[in-house]
Every structure is written in structure tokens, then in C-alpha cells.
Amino acid sequence: MKALLSVSDKKDIEKFASSLVKLGYELYATSGTSKYLSQRNVSVKPLSDITGFSSKANGRVKTLNEKVFEMILAPNNDDVFDLIVVNLYPFMKASKKGEKEMVENFDIGGVALLRAGAKNFNRVTVISSPQQYESFLNEYPLSLQERKNYAREALESVVKYDSNILSHLFEHPFQAVAQDVKKLRYGENPHQQAYVSKVETPSILDDLRVLKGTLSYNNYVDVVSASRMVRRLGDKSVVIVKHTNPCGACIFRENEGETFERALSCDPKSAYGGVLCVNSTIDAELAKKIKPHFFDLIMARSVNEEAVEILRRKKASLVEFSPFTSRKEWRILDGMALIQDVDMDEPFETLEHVTSRKASLQEMNDVKFGLELVRYVKSNAVILVKNGMLIGLGAGQVSRVDAAKIAFEKAKEFGHSVEGSVMISDGFFPFADSVEFGIKKGVKVFVEPGGSKRDRETVQACEKAGTTLIFTRRRLFKH
């Protein structure tokens, strides 16, 4: 029996190779792997004994040889490779160092070996990851189905690898592999089966640590929404999310406790059973403030041990996270993939005052805060903000004036004064009616993209009332 070893990641290869020798394998290895094993007294022959060369093209060609592939692909022969052990150049690590490093870590021979071994799974076993060494030894000798399983995993690694090259080196919106697929309890509704997986590296899942409970399909969707919000709102900000919409939000105030309480005060009724996201550490003091309230999920940058013990008695799942946003976002529906750039840049092209009254410094801070929030509210969206907190939300309406009315109703229901507040819309006001409604309620600053055929009417309504109207020239729809 012969085995071909060519590994970039040397983790556990010495122990595995020694075990293969004990099983009766004759080992052949490419130059780097052969040198590594020989220095550790593992019996191995250089692959150059078969190919007649150690490397060509400045080290880029080591295994691309007709004899090597004949020994892998031959259906039956005495002089063949029975086992291929290959892991690929670390392309993703190289992607952080620029294009030149990515090109040099663009594996060719390793991918070809994995594909050849996978194709001939009837006879050949192909090992594509150090994580498979132990299972191979435990399962040996392998059945046909076990070899087929290893072949499938090898091809998954190849598709993933090529996908990352397309995405990072060639900046193509291509992702084709679901990695580490885990079954969830159910989907959006109990009658729908659901799964969670990584389709890209890095991923928000990399640093998502579940301290308590299990996350549902809807939890994962809300985690992404909440994480994006606090990333833009800044350190120690707090948001409360319900069905991806913020029903509470506040930038950092005097302390984390006050920030949480202000966020909760926006709409404590809707916050019930929602997702609480703290862009900071939850300590014992903050945990005690959170404890009386019911959340389905509590997420924070970190949770100290004392806080974990306080929150352990609650039904809520508890997770630690690191804010992360991919460059592209995917939506796959009925066999169709829609792909777009993630909206994480400034939520405005300009902040153009189109009325005589100019916003104050505090009002401008609220304008910027509100624009960061409104982009995460389902369209049609109108929100009210004041003093760095959300005080009214109108989301998911087919009429913009209805969205505005709901925002004011919410503010009134929970005792928030809208006098002097900032009203922000994710799209232009097609008519002056929403603005006129806000003027009657005491709003001093209105913010919208502009671009309606009736913009002049809206400008005139604000000018007449002595209020401020700001055009951003950037629509922020969320469907």
C-alpha cells in the first residue's frame, strides 16, 4: 500500500504518518512534507523518486506529473496510491496580506490531487483535513461508503477554496458552499425545517459564543441585524430588536445601566420577547437591571462570570458576539440568488439644509444617529429620535404617512415628548402630508433623501413652519 502526503498544515501529521507506517503504508511526500517528517524520524520517500524532479516553476509545480496521477486514477494496479493526504495552501490567511500573497497561495497541485482521489473513491481514500486523521484510523479498514464520504468532504473543501479565491482575489460575488451545517429546531415558523451554516470565511459565526440556551432561525436573523446596528452606533450602545426592527436604541449615556434603561423606554411593550444587544460588557450591575425583563435572547460583547450566574436563571439564550459584516449579502429564493453590497457606509451622500433654519449641534447628532438606525427598519419606515435615543418607530407600512402616524402613536403611548424631535424617513416624502403631520406634533427637524416631484411643497411647508428640512440624497430601503 502506498500513500501520498502533501500538506501545508503540518498539524498532527507526524503522529498520523507514523500510524500509517504501522498499518503497512509506504509513504511518499512532496519536498516540504518529506523534509518535515524525515527530521522527525518518520520513514518517508520523496515524491521526486516517482516524478524525477523536486519542484519546477520556482516551486509552483511539485505534484503535476503524469505518473503521479496515473497511480491515483488507475482502477486496479499493483503500483498505485491507495491513500492521498492533502491540505491546501493557506489562501485565506494570505488574503489579509494583499494580492501578491494571495497569488502565491493559490493552490493548483493540491486541488488536482484532491479531485483525482475523490474521482477514484472506489479504490482511493482521500484525506483533506487534519481533523479527519483520527476518524480514518478509527474506521480503518474503510468501507466503500466511508471512502465516498471522504471524497465528498474533499470536493467540498475544493469548492470552498475556489469560492474564496473568486471572492477575495477576483472580487466576484460567488459563494457556493455551506460549511458546518447545523440543524435548527425549526424555521421562521414551527412547520418549517431550518439550518444554519457558514457560506463565507470570515463569518459572524466565527466569534459567536453561545453561553446558554439554543438559538432559533429567527434569533440568527435578529443577531445579524442587531450586530450591524451597534457596530455603527458605537461602543457601549444598546439596541433592542424585534423581527429585525429596532424597538429600542440608545447611544452610550452616563453608564451602561442608564443606556439600557433609555433604550428599553422607547417601547417596552414591543421589547418583550425581543433580542437585547449590548455593545459592551454585561457586568453584575447591568445584569440585575436586565433580569426583571423578558428577552428571548441577550447578546453582548462579553458577559462576566457574575453576570452569567445572574442571567442563567432566565429563559433567555445568552451569547457573546463580535460585530462583523460581510461585504456582500445574499438572499436565495425559489432557486434564484439575489446578491448586493452590504449597506454599511455612511447613510447619506450629503446633509443638505434646504430650508432657512439650520439644525443645532445636538439636532445634527440626532440626525446622524437616526440615519444609522432607519436603514435597519423595514420599509416604509419613519422614526423619531431625540437626545440620542429612539422614541418612535413606524415600520413596514405600505403608506409613508401611515408609518409617520404610527411613529407618533408609539411615542405618545410610552410618554415620550416629540417636541423638538427629529423625524427621519428611509425614502422621500412623496407628498407634504407626513411633514405637515410632524409639524403639528412639534418636530423641528425632518430628514429624507429628497427626489420627489413634489419636493417643493415639502420644502415650503417646513419653511413656513420655521422647521428644518435636510436632504440626504441617499435612499435607505429595507425589504
Image (cartoon, rainbow, N blue to C red):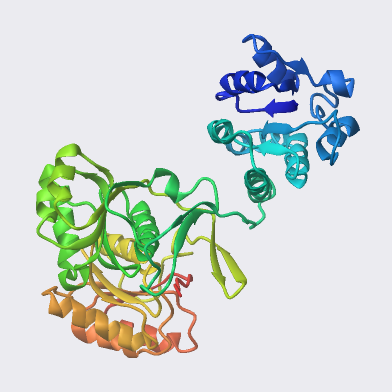
Above or below, 65 against 392 in this view is above
Q: Is residue 70 left or right of residue 240?
A: right
Say which residue appears at 54% left-offset and 33% top-offset.
Answer: 138
In the rendered image, which quarter contains the N terminus?
A: top right
- Looking at the image, residue 393 lies above or below residue 182: below
Asked if one can make out residue 465 in the rendered structure from this viewpoint, the answer is no
Q: Nearer the viewer, residue 414 or 86?
A: 86
Q: Position of residue 164 (x, y in %)?
A: 63, 47
- In-front residue for pair 194/371: 194
Instruction: Decide which of 190, 279 is in the foreground and name it.
Output: 190
**Residue, x 45% and y 57% (percent of image)?**
196
Is 181 positioned to the left or the right of 258 in the image?
right
Residue 8 percent across, percent down from the top left: 65, 28
Is residue 8 among what the camera can see?
Answer: yes
Describe residue 69's horizontal placement relative to residue 296 as left or right. Answer: right
Residue 381 at x, y = what percent?
A: 36, 77
Point 29% across, 59% down: residue: 365
Q: Quadrant of residue 209?
A: top left
Image position of 470 (left or right of 135): left
Circle count: 0
Q: Residue 247 lies in what quarter of the image? A: bottom left
